Amino acid sequence: MKFDSKNKLISFSPQLAILWYSIIASVLSAGLITFVVLYIESQEQAHIDRVTQSVANGVKTLLEKDIRKQITSLSELAHLYAAPLSTSPSQIADDDWAMISHALSDTDYGYQVITWFDKAYKIRKITPVKTKQSTSDFDVALRSPVHLSAIKEKINSGAGLIIAVNSNQGDLGLGIFIPIYKNTKTSQELELGIGSILLLNTYINKVLPSYLLVEHQLTIFIDDKKIYSDGTDDSMIDSTWNKQASFEFLEQTWRIEMAPESEFLSQTHFRMMKTLMLLGVLLSVFFGLAVCSALFAVNQANKIRCDRKKMKQLLNNLPGMAYQALNKTNWPMIFVSDGCEKLTGYTKLEFEQYNILWGSIIHPDDYERVCQTINNAIKLKNVFEIEYRILTKEKSIKFVWEKGESISSSHTNDFILEGFITDITSIKQVEFDLIDSDAFSNTIVNSVVEAVITIDQRGMIKSFNDAAQKMFGYTFDEIKDQAIKILMPKYYNDKHDDYLSHYIKTNQIHIIGTGRELVAQRKDGEVFPIHISVSEFKNHENRMFVGVIRDITQQRASQEQRRLHTEQLAHADRLNSLGEMAAGMAHEINQPLTAISLYSQTAKNFCKNNQFEKLPSIFEKISQHSRRAGAVLESVQIMTRQGERLKEVVNCKLLIDEVIKLAELEARLYDIKIVPIVANKNIKLVVDRVQIQQVILNLLRNAMEAMQSIGCKNGSTITLTESLKTDGFIEITIADTGCGLAEKMIEKLFTPFSSTKNNGTGIGLSISKRIIEEHNGQINFIPNKPSGAIFLFTLPVHDEGNLDDKFNDK
């Protein structure tokens, strides 16, 4: 279940939707079945009501008819004896009475006793004739004051009477009294009467058919007084089921009430309702399950259709043909996807109607190999993969790749083949081209004079051309899959793995893409110099490195000869330049001598003023400038020598600090401040310390003289800046705010004997230029805007790395 916050809707999964629909269907079916059950219940209740009412009406009819019959019979008996009323009743023979009363009792069943009483309400005759006990067997009206009062009142009104009586044993009965009157001139007087008692249980059982009371309970009321009930507890009767019937007789209201027996209701109505409810619940559940099954089947059918559509779309998008084929000769196709036409030129219908068999389009040269491969796979129950050629409808040849397996048919015991076939013609063509290209590349690589070696990212040798075999003395079989460090001296051999793993992790380039001169080792242990260039390329997911190696043993020998020759030329050039420098010697030596003179004069003044504590520092400055003059003379001597100059590794900041201390006294004399700006305190140089200091000191003095010549009107600060360049050089800049240089002087600024000073020799900048160039640097000049000059020179930074790393050192 998902909630769409944009549309404020809840979407259900198909399974949950089916469940909800099934529940709704079950609820609806339960409601419908409940309605039907309630309807059936109402009809059943109406039917029971009709039957009960019909029984009540039948009982009423039977009782009314029989009571009337009883009254009629007794009335006829009374009128039978009305003639001899003037005669004493005792005159009627007992035999006649017995015969007539017995005949009446036998004819109209139910009489318990028939009596003849006189006007004093005394029993004169009784049937059957028994002992006294027979006359006292019933508590009749003659022995009950209440009943007697009712009899008198009723008889005096000229009507008969029916009352309820009880026997001494507690049996219910009906007392029926018929009066006989004697007519007088003024009124009627009771002469005698006929009375009878009916036992209700006996009477009801004989008057009413037994089948009427089997399923119902009978209750009889006379003037709302219950005179009879069939014995069932009245509290157990549901009054909602009671039905009534009534009639009027002898000015009395008889009411008949009928109610179905509880057992009858339980067995017929309630049990049926329970059965119907249970059946309704089962039907609701079955209906819900049926709806669920139907919806699930519909959903599955839709899913199958959707899956088939997706599968068809997938098969159509595949670059080839999916198939099912019979494992028979030439493999008749049961099913092929639409890609068959693009692959072979034949339509889907042609294959599936067996107009074209797949085996018939396999190239004859490949047919046996295909059959053998497929048959072996079927026997071993394996998946098979095979490449072969087919002949298309246009008679062209295509290379195809097939993968499939055999499965058991669901209809027969045979095997069928399922698989996929795709066109690999272009791949095969690329493969052939690669083979040709590889052969061509190997020919070219083996024809070059340099050694070409390929290694993988683990440093294992993968190719070793002929030149490499000649250079190192190994054959390819000997060197294949060996570590590249086998071609290195032991010093580099131990560090090779660290270099390679470091590059793989960091990609920090050292010699990749550039050339380096290293040393290598032959199979016989000989170490020789090489020049190597390394390139990287990726082979699938692996990184590969190709090194091109050239033996530079002869080149090194030639370079050494050229170096010696160049050194000899340089020595001759220095001798030729000595004449130029001789003129500048006085200038170079005069500077420290002048400083010594000034410090000496200062020391003299301190002595006069008794400031002896300052003398040690003055003497130290005099000693420094003395050594400075000696160093100048020594540098001249070095220039006249043949061979390399003495260079050392120095810290650039310390070098600049030393120069500033040397120029400090002279700057104070001119009231000029030298401000150093150092970018990096750890930059190191390999230089002749004295010569570089001489260059910086010379540029500082020129700057101070240029600023002093105009009275420092543009400022009194010289900026000495050190900055590191990206090309591995450091740049030192001296910027002043002096008089600057004229345009005509800029062109010949570094030419010997060119000077803007009145008493200058013009060789200071020339010597500085030569010194910087001998250190592989450059010196230059740019105007300082708005006034002044900027002199700058560069020097290479010292590389502390090992200059003889192996060829794949990163």
Image: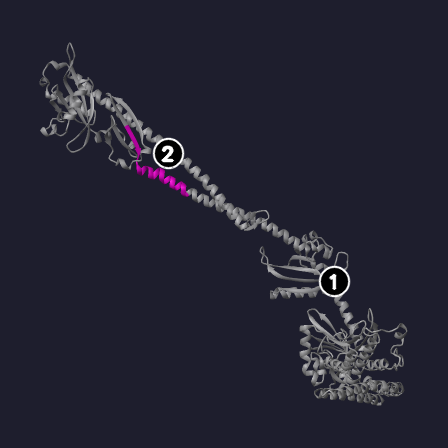
Q: Is residue 131 shown to the viewer in this render?
A: no
Identify the image quadrant of residue 712.
bottom right
Q: Which residue is at the front of the view, 668 or 522?
A: 668
Q: Position of residue 323 (x, y in %)?
A: 66, 57
296 w.r.t. 477: above or below: above
Q: Which mark, residue 204?
A: none
Q: Badge 2: how crowded within 10 Å, few (<14), some, or many (20+)?
A: some
Mark 2 or 1, which is nearer the eye? Answer: 2
Please indicate whether residue 46 sits to the left or right of residue 452 in the image: left
Hey, what amino acid is under mark 2? Gln
Instruction: Identify the magenta region.
Output: 256-278
Q: Main secondary structure of the magenta part?
A: helix
**Residue receiving disc 2:** 45
Q: Position of residue 381 (x, y in %)?
A: 60, 64
Identify the image quadrant of residue 383.
bottom right
Q: Which mark, residue 425?
A: 1
> What distance separates the C-alpha of mark 2 from that of mark 1?
88 Å
Is label 1 in a helix, a strand or a loop? helix
Please indicate whether residue 609 sits to the left or right of residue 141 in the image: right
Hey, what amino acid is under mark 1? Thr
